[in-house]
Image (spheres, coloured by chain):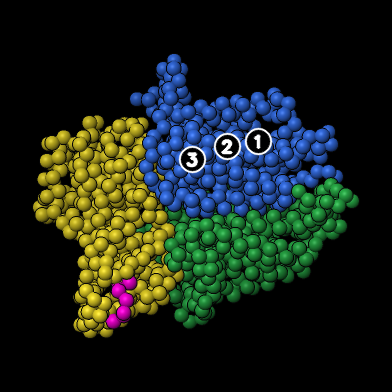
Amino acid sequence: MSYDHRRTRRLFTGLVAGLGIAASALADEPLKTCFLYSNPIGESGWTYQHELARKELVAAVGNKITTKFVENIAEGPDAERVIRNFVQEGCKVIFTPSFGFMEPTVKVARQAPNVIFLNGSGYKTASNLGVYNARYYEGRYLEGVLAGAMSKKGVVGYVGAFPIPEVLQGLNAFAQGMRSVNPNAQIKLIWVNAWYDPGKERDAASTLMKLGVDVMAYATSGVSIVTTAEEKGVYTLGYYSDVSKFGPKTNLTSIMHTWGPYYVKVIEDVLAGRWKSGNVVGGLREGMIRMAPLNAAVPADVRERFVRAERDLIEGKLHPFAGPVIDQDGKERVPAGKVLSVEELNSMNYLVQGIDGTVPKK
Amino acid sequence: MENHLITSIISATIICGTPLIIVAIGTLVAEKSGVLNLGAEGMMSVGAVAAFAVAFSGGSPLLAVLAGMAAGCAMSLLFGFLTLTMLANQVASGLALAIFGVGLSAFIGKPFESAPIGIVPPIPIPVLADIPVIGPALFNHQSLVYFSWLLVGAVIWFLYRSRWGLVLRAVGESPSAAHSVGYKVIALRYAAVAFGGAMAGVGGAFMSVYYTPLWAEGMVAGRGWIALALVVFATWRPLRVVLGAYLFGGVMISQLFVQGSGLKLDVPAQFLSALPYAATIIVLVVISRNANTIRLNSPVSLGQPFRADS
Amino acid sequence: MLLKLEARPEASQRMRYLSPLIAVALTLAGSLVLFALLGKSPIEGFKVFFIHPIRDLYSISELLLKATPLMLIAVGLAVGYRANVWNIGAEGQYILGAIFATGVALFFQGVSSIWVLPAMLVAGVLGGVVWAAIPALLRTRFRANEILVTLMLVYIAQLTASWLVHGPWKNPDGFNFPATYMFDDSALLPVLIEGTRLNLAFLIALTALGAGYVFLQRSFYGYQMQVAGQAEAAARYAGYSAKRTIWIGLLAGGAMAGTAGMSEVAGPMGQLTESISMNYGFAAIIVAFVGRLNPVGILFSSILMAMLYLGGEQAQQYMNLPSSISKVFQGMLLFFLLAADLFIGYRLRLGSNPFFGKATWKTT
């Protein structure tokens, strides 16, 4: 495609798109798409998955866009400055995938109506600010199924980071999945109060193993948990990324955050002038999360059970929080025959039966 | 079950305390010579990343530890040059070293961020490891854990039994007196500072190659500072450093066990996490109350620059 | 080596002021070398680090915004450091200031009164003072080393903030995320220049620098602090109270750090979250030293330090360098300064002259 031809096409889409995003489409250069990361990219984890998705995006629509990213920016006031810099240097679509970037994104979005903002895991929207998130808990339910089936003792460990909704939903869905296989299984829970402290995570993992767990899951960065467990032959269920390279023998599967297809869709919508703000939530069905290939250690019958549950979740026949959902104190949170509403899900602040631990309280 | 738990808690406590012991003992020797180096956190970080880089490129754990040692040592010599040769303020230089080291480690550690390396297996000591309860708790550890014990023994012998240890302490007590009887105060202090840096590097290597094992920015997570606190906590006595480190590790590990056992403590997790820090302050107060304990043990010239040839 | 050190007959006033400039120049040179070693253009690096942050009014406002907490904390620390009171836990006092100020803001949620902000300021100061009073009390009553106590209190402060935003102060409409409400407008510091984030806190910081100048350079107490720092025996002989020196030194640091904490939550943050801890308390230590423990110097060094922060961000954004390069430069700056300070008391001589044969390492 010749340069001029491309330019004409863009001019055309720009006119169709209307004033809001005309500026981006009218520009001579390709659509500048910028990413703000809160952590170093590394080799696995939340940020790493967003970076993979950025690369996927480039591979898919590379000639129509340019991308850039800035990593390791503290959540809070510094983020606002970097986002503003993005706007100043001509970024037309800005992804800020972190809850801690929500308020700064909201502030800058207010002042830059011609730029499109997408904040990952936040909840505040505006006409030029969309939020996106995934139903991670669907994957957690599947991990729970594996944990219930693979734990010989019926004692499963879970390392928590902070009790934010994503973590609590995941933990509870995990318990629901686990108890669907083994109704007597118990989760031992430790909060380490850190997303990223390999030393502490390792201590928590060793403690859980010494307390007799034979399967472990986590909501922290997790790599040191997987390596520690591999050393002791304890199964792990990964999160964020496929972490099988850290635990080739014991990592049963991982929930992978796969933002690529969504990013491609957003950019295609923007380019075509049909992007609309909103709150996008995807799960297994939409491919926003995927399960990493099962470890060879998973026997055929468990594999089958896992695949069936996965299919049911995708087809909507199974909901991780289908009633009855009973909390730790025996209170019925969701009656039989109903499923948890989105509001109830978002304000989840309790632990379900089968979890031996507490949510840090007031 | 009960025995098994006791074994586990002791074993985990020892592992948790090991980097603290190694770093604190190194710092103690430096401080005994009269030099206060607050840069442990920075030296540990650089040691951790250097060791990890070697392990990641296929070097043996021993080689990795040596690399960490060399890196920590190099950092401490930078500090030594500033404070001993250029007579700069020790507190400020140490803080600069801490900030610089943490930044530098993040900078050079970029390519190794959460890359995988192999586990260093524990070495059970024959016979001793078979003693019930105590055996597996004490005698089935990675080599650096045993090294930390040997280190403590060696430093005790050196400080209190050897001639050079006596000289080192004399330098810390009264550098001008030591100088007047012909000892090279500055050279000795350089040696002590370098030893402190080397041990901080080993402590860092333990974190990145033996303990987690991985490199991640900020993974030392304040352990260097805690090691510094331990030295004062221990009133500059090596055995008390061990006691303090295990006490600290014990509090840290027990709170995890309390959580993991599902005991319904109505205490926020942050309070439990804060316990070791609060405990350090309390012990500091208790030992400092009695002027004599501090005065008898702390090196008199600690933190003061010394100029020879007067 | 032919160069020898020789004590000056008296400390060089010229060097005292020249040394920070030498340190800055050396850091600059060092940074250019580092850029070259990393395969980046040193000129580009220089531009990104030192020109970008002052290229327009908005950039300058951001620079001053970043410098504000550093200024505040450093001037407070300088009071203590002059008297050899080593408060290295300003970070904790800063967090407590933020916590106390947030408490007031949340208490007056929905009340729009011009008194909310002053109350928050008082609370912020109080928070820092309370946190600094602990090491002061423990030092004066029990001789507990303030370096360690202030440091341990940083961790406790961070965990306290974490507990508050996860627990009692969590925004009930915030989907369980660990953050307080966004403050009402009446609890936010007014912005000085429309369209920027530079707020009243900058003026408060300038006032603090002025007050610090009067206290340190012109007041009798300030003089006492200095004597206590330089010659403990002389201070004792003159009957200056060592305890009072410790109290003033620590509380001044706490009050200023608390103010900085307040200005952060009531300024660019607009709420309390766990990311309140930005390590300003530690960076301010470098600022205080590079500024010669002198308020005028601190004004410049805090801006320089802010420049290194913003430069690091920009280096990442435009040159694809890791942002940790900021810390490397910050460390370098202090190293060079401390080394250059040697020449306040000493000078270099060519050692080849037999008359100056051996180095003379004497105090002045």
Check disc 2 and report the residue beneath it: B199
Tell me if B174 is positioned left or right of C292 in this view: right
In the rendered image, which quarter contains the C terminus of chain B? Answer: top right
Q: Chain of mark 3?
A: B
Q: Amino acid at mark 1?
A: Val
Asked whether A238 or C263 is in front, the reply is A238
Q: Sequence-wise, which precedes: disc 3 or disc 1?
A: 1
In the rendered image, which quarter contains the N terminus of chain B? Answer: top left
Reply yes or no: does residue A236 show up in magenta. no
Residue B207 lies, with reference to residue A112, above or below; the image says above
Tell me if B292 is positioned left or right of C110 in this view: right
Q: Chain of mark 2?
A: B
Check disc 1 and report the residue beneath it: B29
Asked whether C209 or A324 is in front, the reply is C209
The local crowd at label 3, few if under 14, some if 14 to 19, many if 20 or more residues have their Cα within 10 Å, is many
The letter of the blue chain is B
State how far apart marks 2 and 1 are (Cα): 10 Å
Q: Chain of mark 1?
A: B
Q: Amino acid at mark 2?
A: Met
Q: Are marks 2 and 1 on the same chain?
A: yes
Quadrant of res A341: bottom left
Q: Secondary structure at mark 3?
A: helix
Check disc 3 and report the residue beneath it: B51
Callouts 2 and 1 close, C-beta under 8 Å? yes
Which residue appears at 55% of the width and 38% of the height?
Answer: B69
> Chain A shown in which color?
yellow
Residue A61 lies, with reference to residue B19, above or below; the image says below
